Amino acid sequence: MKHLRYIIFLKSVVLLSIVSNNATAFSTFSSFQVPQQTDSSKLDTTKRNVDPAANNVKITQQGESKIEYSARDSTKYSKDRSIIHLYGKARVIYQTFELDAEYIRYDSKNNTVFARGAHDTKGRYYGKPIFKMEGSGSSVADSLFYNTKSGKGTVYNTFTEQEGSFFSGGQSKKQPDDEIHVKNTIYSTCNLPHPHFGFFITKGIVTEKQVITGPVYLEIEDIPLPLGLPFAFFPKPNKKASGVIVPSVGEDATQGFFLRDGGYYFGLSDFWDAKLMGTIYTRGSYTTTASANYLKRYKYGGNLNFTYASTRLGIEGTESNRPQKNFHITWNHSQNPNASPGSTFSAQVDAGTSSFYRTTAANNTYNPRAISNNVLRSSISYSKTAGIWNFSTNLGASQETQTKTVSLTLPQISLSMASINPFDSKKRVGEQKWFQKFNVGYSMDATNRVSTTEDLLFAPGGLKRFQNGVNHNVNGSLPFTLADYFNFTTSATYNEQWHFQTLRQTQLRVLNRPDSLVYDTISGFKRSAEYSAAMNLTTKIYNTLQFKKTGKVQAIRHVMTPNIGFSYKPDFSAPSKGYYEVLRYQDGTPVTDPQFNREKRYSIFQGTQYSGPSEGQTAALNFGLNNDVELKLLNPKDTTGTGVKKIPIIQGLNINGSYNFLKPAYKLSTLSFSGRSQLSEKIGINFNGNLNPYAVEDEVTSSGLVTKKLVDRYTWQNGKLPRLTSFGFSFDYSFNPESFKRRTENLDQLQNGMEKKGITPEQSTALAAISRDPNAFVDFNIPWNFSFAYSLQYSASETGLNGRTTNSLTFNGDFNATPKWKVQFNSGFNFETKNLSLTTLSIYRDMHCWDMSFQWVPFGTYRSYSVTLKVKASILQDLKLSKQQGYSSTF
């Protein structure tokens, strides 16, 4: 079975490498095409302002064309001057044929050119002939013979490049009928004159549309392998060609023997192609995949992929062996920004059944990151800008694969107007008057959204689960400057919402259990509106502490940005307005609200797409303070001693809150704070949290339990600080940040190329690999790196009970074991399970035109390994050997 597998593999490699790509092994010999007859005047050096004497260039006539020749060392002629010998960096130009060599002999009587190199005193061969023709690249040979009249030629031991492929050795002959006869030529993607590997073509004939060869076999390090084809006949089209994709053969311990990724390739046009592939197992599993790539240069490009899998795992006859049906679809579309100025369209779709990656081992890629991914996100968006108006629409989806929940947005529409100054004039000269600074803006959002589980998404009545609505917002503001230091702004906002569902609530009395609510959704159109007004004042306060007699520390600068404002909003919760209802028990008795000491109310828009007006009247004082602290140090890299380096100690330490004068109780809001600090290029810190200013007292329930309750009294009245109810802290550190910079630059370069020229299938594959796996980008210029990230989150109830702390630690790194060996690792620590999280170890070996990679997940649910030895060049991407042991390949 293994021998059969390798024979099929070799045939597929030869077929793909020679036939399916325009850069075929034989197209390189097009440099021997018959020269086009050109006007001799175009080759006349006198008309190109060239002085033959000054450049050691001599010209001779052959028919209607001229031949230019020169030599640095010497030029010798035969007695009848029909033969010219050129020594030392000789050069001959005839029509579109250019030739450079250490020695050239030109026979004008027989119309022949012969060129070769020479041996130095140490026996080294130098000055090999380098020849070039119009439309072809340069080629190097040991020697060559060329007939300028018939166009026939013979090249010995050539070395040439054709679109990333290289051809070396052997002998080739150009015939008058444009046929090229080749013998003992090696085709390879290795750029060395003596390649590490290649396909040895013993003999062949190349025409414009076809290739006929004798025996072809694979050769590695000059060792011929006993694997090859006795003869072959291949078409050589100048465009994409359709053909069969030969499957790979193997065995899976659970699913049996398989034929993997076999199918058919459709070379439909220069703009798009498609593949239809499938995998079958002897124990009943199968997978089908349909994919397509499309590209219109300078316009748009993308790819589409759909996979359906029926998987049988476990022992036959058991429950786990029942077929598991899964599907997965991806679509990526990008548009060139210059293709349609003012409008953009993009798509990134990643959707399917939640168990697809785990059941199919990431579609047989055994990618641990894909297997452990818990969220699938999709987005299709379009935007259009016309004058001051901007329109955008988005279709979105999000799947939680663990909980099997789905959130769909079908669609979200936004329309916004840029702020305008209605009282300003385009013909105005000079500064704006106070009333001309008034600006007004408008925005509209419409959303249709649903959140449900996978099994209920397409169940009967699924459309009724969608929540939808429209939100309109009009705002106006008038800014002032007071006393040159204070920025004062007055503003007003009107908000109107259109609802298509409302909710009704009923409180149930349940014995020996907490009361519960019953919700009833009512379909129908309902409008709500609210308005508010506000004033805001802000300024900046600078404090600088200078150090004159110290060393490196020059100064500490503290910038405070206080802001204070007042906002007012009427009460829209009165039942007479129709936005709020009185909450009642099932017998009609009103429920009492102890906070406001009145009947408890609820919004009929609570839980819908747009929540409607807020409850209560507001006359609030809003306050906040932003702090930035910066340290100035002498720059050690500045040799003048006058340069300084700024280090931000604290960036954006914000504290915010508000006090509502009209609220019956608990007038002061919770206090929120956040901040960040980039201490150096290697480390950055972020933190945030909330403080509750109200005191807590014990309360005895009717069942005799003692709990905590919030009271309308501040904690500092009891000599205590506000209570911390939530806190988040995270930081990351890289010992060598240059590695992440290089990877980011690589991604940016690939993205920019996609935007300018459209995405190709190779770019799409490379981008996806680098995005999902940092190990896919191996940079030997970075000798080592180690980085880690830590995150801590704490949350508790408003009374401080039920506090919960979660934290996580991840780390990764790499190092060059030798100039050609790279070792990479990724891991982390799960503080809840007290174990290491998903851990991967990768080893990469650069073998010039080959590379070898090893990836290992040493422990855990997804324990697996894979070893791959492959050719670097994408043209021979199927020339590889791989061995993998996946987590689903064992019982």
Image (tube, rainbow, N blue to C red):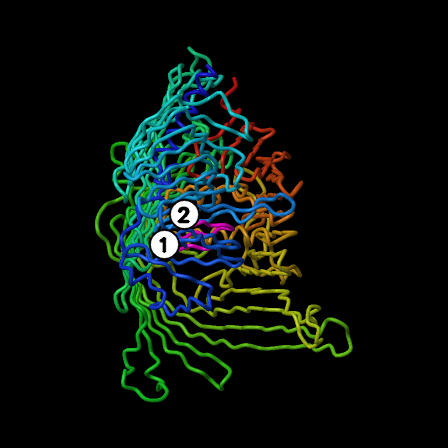
Most distant residue in the left direction: 524
Q: Depth check: 813 or 477 in front? A: 813
Dot 2 falls on a residue whose secondary structure is strand
Q: What residue did someone put label 2 on?
A: 113
Q: How many labels does the image show?
A: 2
Q: Which residue extends farthest top? A: 317
Out of 142 and 527, give the one closest to the viewer: 142
Marking on residue 94? 1
Q: What residue is at 46 percent from the left and 28 percent from the top? A: 361
Classify residue 85 as left or right of residue 508. Answer: right
Q: Residue at x 27, y 86 (%)?
A: 427
Is residue 630 shown in magenta?
A: no
Secondary element type, mark 1: strand
Magenta residue span: 91-106
Residue located at (39% from left, 70% from top): 568
Type of amino acid at the residue the image marks with label 1:
Tyr
Q: Position of residue 477 (x, y in %)?
A: 36, 75
Alpha-carbon distance for marks 1 and 2? 10 Å
Mark sitting earlier along the chain (1/2): 1
Q: Nearer the viewer, residue 602 or 31?
A: 31
